[in-house]
Image (cartoon, grey):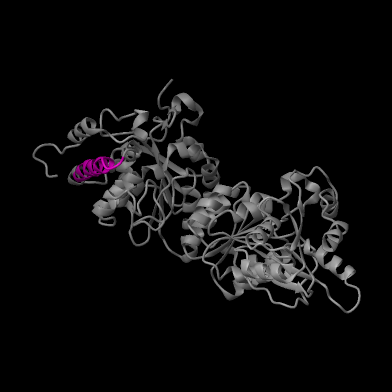
Amino acid sequence: MPLNTSLSFLRIVERWFSLLSKQEVTDAEARCRHHRRRILETSQLLSALHVAPAFSCLEIVDAIYFYSLNATSDTFILSKGHGAMAQYAVLEAMGIMSEEQLNSVCQPGSQIGGHPDRGNPGVIASTGSLGHGLPIAVGLARADNERGSDGTVFVVMSDGEFMEGSTWEALLIAPSIGVTNIVVVVDHNKSISRGEIPVAHPNMLPLAPKISAFGWSVAEADGHSVNEITTAISQRPRGQPFALVCHTTKGRGVSFMENEPIWAYRSPSGDEFVQAMDELADPSGDEE
Amino acid sequence: MRDAFARALHNASKRRDDVFFLVADISPASSLDDFLAESPTRFIDVGVAEQSLIGIAAGIAMRGFRPFAYTIANFSIYRPFEQIRVDLCYQNLPVVVVGVGGGMAYSALGSTHHTIEDIAVMSALPNMTVVAPCDPLEVDEAVHASFGLEGPMYLRLGKAGEPDLTADAPEPFELGRIRKIREGYSVAILGYGPVLGLALDVANALDIGPEERIAVFSVHTMKPLDLKRLAEILNSFERVVTLEEHVEFGSLGSRVRQLAFEQSSDVDVQCLALHDRFIHVYGAQADLRNAHQITSEALVDAVKG
């Protein structure tokens, strides 16, 4: 069975010019290694943490915050709530969440938990239950229209959320009610708790044409290339809601975590932590 | 009641510019036309998609608007229960979920269209305010009062054509306060929703002459329940009768019995509620009530003790 039948569909990003300079690409790669190390460090304070789901969407979250999001008018929702550590690490790097807050995640007395919670620094919506983020985002975008704002609502979703009916409801409704100021970025790692989507639910694939059929403009990208993600979002056609299906690897960045379901929930033990940090070290000669 | 709701919403939209009205492929009668004509961009029909009805309303409320999410009562809360719990209650957003046809108002459409557990289910949710007006006048008051809330409200409506029961009520409507709608000193009938019409009929029939013995109270706000006044009622009447078009579990009756137990009250409490079973009877609303012994005869018996 082909692992990914959707790669041939609308893979137009390659044809676009690259938005980021070589230096910006290098910076983004260094930043994402740093984010991953911070998540691993936090994981050592806890027995269980969603590490691999955060690694899967890390470049997506970084690309949106650092290159796409207008802080004064745009909105970010991590509908894939179990990727929370990715958002927290990026928020720390941006100075929105403090180091102490990130280190306190899931600890007694902390306000920061395993899923984003409305009221946390930089968090507008409480997510964690799949399929809730997109309808909320459609409401935010629609309300922005009513206020005369030109803000865009960015929603990061897991591909597992495309098994929820509420996601398809909202995909259907957004263009019907004239919502075009919304960008959905799908973390398409093709992995769910009990296995692989191509094996367990092959009819979910390809994802992109299904979203397109609901009246959205759709593109695909390498979900671990900040440059491809940024470029695709920047070059999106206007006048339609936009979805970017990003092909990703769960646990990306640490060899023994990649595509291994156990790392959806586990924190690495001592030796594993050392090896993982080693793999994520910056190349010698580079700055941290 | 749905006309009263649409009128109240339209009136509110004339005073304020933050009213959003969302429906799921349903219209609350022609009374909506005025709202549509004046505020077309603040109306959204999401289609047959109740989860998104609530989710979109939550997003709109996050921006400071006051959304009303309207559909048939059973669809308004059961299909999108988790959206109500997480998007509205957990995040404490001021969305009014409006359920039309609460109880068995859609009597002939079968149990799929009945809403007989809603008060219990909605009352279990932290941050939720639960309101069940007894007549069109209380609907207007409830819509008006909803703007004072910081969090979500579930508003249980009947359907159309309910009579006004409270035009001459001795007390005004006040959200969160049990309201006396008929004077009396001996027996108190407590209830909510249009079934209170039955209570007034029975009280009027039994109280012959100038002396008013049977008081009737509208417990329009089922959450937060006005425990202070409930305690006073338990202390000052010989008998308390609860009447509701709702299953016994998590009902007004169970709350009254609980409080009576907690304060070691020796008052006689009689509870009329729907039985713990779905209804496979068709006909008028009264026929369905009859099937669960919600009748004037049963109420007379309860009042007499």
Check if residue B183 falls in the magenta segment: no
Q: Position of residue B145 (x, y in %)?
A: 61, 71
Magenta span: A27-46
Figure check: B56 above or below A207: below
Most extreme residue toward the right, as rendered?
B209
Residue B125 is left or right of residue B209, and the answer is left
Please tell me which residue lies in front, B145 or B57. Answer: B145
**Which corner quadrant holds the N terminus of chain A?**
top left
Check if residue A39 falls in the magenta segment: yes
Q: Position of residue A172 (x, y in %)?
A: 55, 45
Which corner quadrant of the image does residue A248 belong to?
A: top left
Residue B185 is left or right of residue A171, and the answer is right
Residue A193 seen in render: yes
Q: Image point 76% across, 47% down: which residue?
A: B275
Residue A126 is left or right of residue B136, and the answer is left
Please tell me which residue lies in front, A75 or B171. Answer: B171
